[in-house]
Image (cartoon, grey):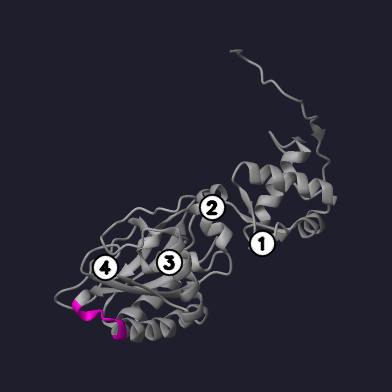
Amino acid sequence: MTHGRVDGPVTELTPEPEGNGHTIGPGRGYTIESLDTGLRLMQLFLTHDTLTVSGAAELLSVGRSTAHRVLRTLEGRGFAIRDFSGRGYSAGPELVRLGRPAGFGPAVREQLGAVLEDAVHRTGETVQSTALIGDQIIVIDGRESSQPVRVMPEVGSTHPAHATSGGKLLLSLMTTEQVCALYPQEKLPAATPGTVTSRSALLAELQEIRSLGYALSRGESVRGMNTVAVPLAGSSWRDRLALMAAAPADRGDDAALVRRAGELRLSAALLNTV
């Protein structure tokens, strides 16, 4: 073991010229060009679900060979993944885990609050907004039902995405490659006896959710609790949210859940008007 050195090739530090749009200050006087390119490419995944080598090269104003090397490096560290065709790249699991979920900013929370108030009024059940962090969902905000027997909202709590309607809805908005990267093993953990426990079954269900536009969970996360979720906001994995209604199973048969999906869509549509 050696101390005080890093073995390997040395990358030259290039002085950063002033007036190029970067802030000059302590620690910013020099840039490592290849690292800067990699960081800028990672930022592109915040607004692009997939990137080709040529597309990344054009957006970054670099050569295709440079874009290819950077994408391959990010892939090797789990920050990017290739689709089955081999032509495009998506955000990898490490980058997804690093992303701060949407919905925590005060302006967004105010807008979400109006949507949640409308949703709890329409459905009569507890409603929650959820975001995806890796293979878990986190409850961003919620409103409690006035029913005597009701589900309690748990703001800040996390749950396995594959066992919840909100999680499955958000997973369905990802590519198959992204889902497989989050779940590298065929066997999935069970939260209850009703939880889907194979990746193959999950992928099949996600395909159905994409065609229906809503997701259901029947006692899969908590016994005796059924939920339904619809898309709420966001155009990329970084800022997508789901709107979920939860009720005791005796008020949550399939017909009731499908009806609430329609009611939740009406509430979700308010987000762009408040």
Question: Horizontal placement of 35 versus 232: left or right?
Answer: right
Q: Which residue is mark 2?
A: 181
Q: Earlier in the sequence, mark 4 or mark 3?
A: 3
Whether 90 is drawn above or below 78: the answer is: below
Pair 1/4: label in front: 4
Pair 1/2: label in front: 2
* Foreground residue among 149 and 193: 193
Residue 45 position in % (x across, y down): 64, 57
Q: Earlier in the sequence, mark 3 or mark 1?
A: 1
- Locate residue 132: give its quadrant: bottom left
Q: Which residue is mark 1?
A: 50
Q: CA distance from mark 4 to mark 3?
A: 14 Å
Q: CA distance from mark 2 to mark 4?
A: 26 Å
Question: Horizontal placement of 158 versus 41: left or right?
Answer: left
The disc at residue 219 is 4
Q: Earlier in the sequence, mark 2 or mark 4?
A: 2
Tell me the chief SS of the magenta region: helix
Task: Residue at 68% x, 46% y: name it.
Answer: 39
Residue type, label 4? Gly
Stretch in magenta: 250-255
Q: CA distance from mark 1 to mark 4?
A: 34 Å
Disc 4 packing (10 Å; few <14; some 14–19; many ≥20): many
Residue 252 falls inside the magenta stretch: yes
Residue type, label 2? Ala
* Foreground residue among 125 and 143: 125
